[in-house]
Amino acid sequence: MLAGIFWFSAAAFAQSCPDLQSYSPSHNPATQEEWAARLPALEALLESCLRNDAYFALLGAAQLNIGEVPQALESLERALLINPKNGAAQIDYAEALFRVGQLFAAIEINDSLLKREDLPANLQPALLARQRLWQQQTRQHQFLLEATTGYDNNLNGGPTRSDLTLTFGGTPVVLTLNPDYQPIQGSYANLRLGGAWQFQAPDYQHDFLATLRVRKTSAGDTDLAQADARYTFSLPTRHNRWEFSAGASHMQFGGSPLYSVGDLRGRFIWGANQCRPSLEAGLQELHYHAQSVMDGAETSVTAGLGCTFSESRQGLRLDVGLLNNNAQNASRPGGDRTGWNVRLNWQVQLGANEISTQLGYASLDDQYGYSALLANNATRNVQSEYINLHYKRLLKSNLALLVNLNHQLQHSNLEPFQNRGTAAEVGLALNF
């Protein structure tokens, strides 16, 4: 408690307000239990001390030290409205602002305290230490290393059926699918390395995220490697937030390049409440290295709602989007595609345990018939569903146990695009 014995002056007490020195804890710093014991007596003095800045500074200190941060902010603001130069209130007000995430306001107030000529010499080292600590948080980085092993019953994303019905001149012909293209199941090992960098300023924020994933399998040529990167520039306002981002992804499958993706996105997030709506627009370019005829440019608009429940330590997010995928090549089977998707994410923290779930559904329709060999050139419809379950248990401060279960199912009126797969894995995650 930095401000416990700082700048309490008897001359500042109103006549009707008693001597507050006896209401201060006897130890400095005081324990949470001592502050909790003092709080009821302080609250009983409210009517007598409505114009006393020292009273509200002491009340705010008690509330802050027992974890009642919103109440502490209100009390400390009242103290500073009565007397803007109250040093005790300024010290605790900066701490309360830091705890609710207002980092730069806390740094600014702490800096003004360090410039005061009447600052007690014994407080300066503590204020300097927290100023350095807070300023370090404007530039943060973190690295993640995950190693998992598991089993997947469709490592290559093969179609569900082992035979396909083709149409030749309107006559259906059943052909057996080459075993190399049927679902391949087997065990695998995953290694994932990620890094996140963040730089905050009072009016904007930079974020950069990069990950590299390598999967080694026991069956067939189904190894893969994937690299992803994303940069986000954020502009927070008092109640809203703008986010602009650019990302890229590249995948190698079976030792050969499969696809590369680049995208641009802009999102606006409303409000500062427990639940915040958002609207996002995106543009994505997708290139298939071995089949450039399948290349496309996709535009999307997504409406979302994200909620954070701090008391139950839960988070919930729902996104619903419309998309349009334009063929880059006029001969692409099916032509342009339109559709929609919905995603639901839920997360809960239970002590050292974290559980999260992602659910998704998407529907896409082609503009033209896909192929004369499939259902007499029927227009393709594809509906995709997935569910991902993740369990994480903290073993140490930077080491966690991971258990993941993923299932995806794809329906289509054309047989080659019907598939499903389930994967289960367990492993460890290290933060450093």
Image (tube, helix red, strand yellow):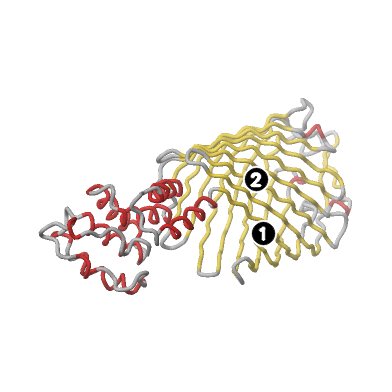
Crowdedness of circle 2 by 10 Å Cα count: few (<14), some, many (20+)? some
Mark 1–mark 2 distance (CA, rounded to whole Å): 17 Å
Nearer to me, 378 or 428: 428
| Residue 321 x, y percent position in the rendering | 56, 39
| Residue 38 x, y percent position in the rendering | 26, 70
- The vertical placement of 232 against 59, above or below, is above
In this view, the mark in front (1 or 2): 1
Residue 170 visible in image: yes
Sequence order check: which comes first, mark 1 or mark 2? 2
SS for dot 1: strand
Which residue is the site of mark 2? 383
Residue extending farthest to the left is: 16
SS for dot 2: strand
Quadrant where the C terminus is found in the figure: bottom right
Q: Residue at x 73, y 63 (%)?
A: 147
Among the 4 quarters of the image, the one containing residue 193: bottom right
Quadrant where the N terminus is found in the figure: bottom left
Which mark, by number, is residue 55?
Answer: none
Is label 1 in contact with label 2 (beta carbons under 8 Å)? no
Residue 367 visible in image: no
Query: Which amino acid does the dot numbered 1 rest on?
Result: Asn
- The vertical placement of 123 against 25, above or below, is above
| Residue 236 x, y percent position in the rendering | 47, 39
Nearer to me, 388 or 394: 394
Residue extending farthest to the top is: 330
Query: Which amino acid does the dot numbered 2 rest on?
Result: Gln
| Residue 361 x, y percent position in the rendering | 60, 48
Which residue is the site of mark 1? 406
Q: Residue at x 67, y 54 (%)?
A: 408
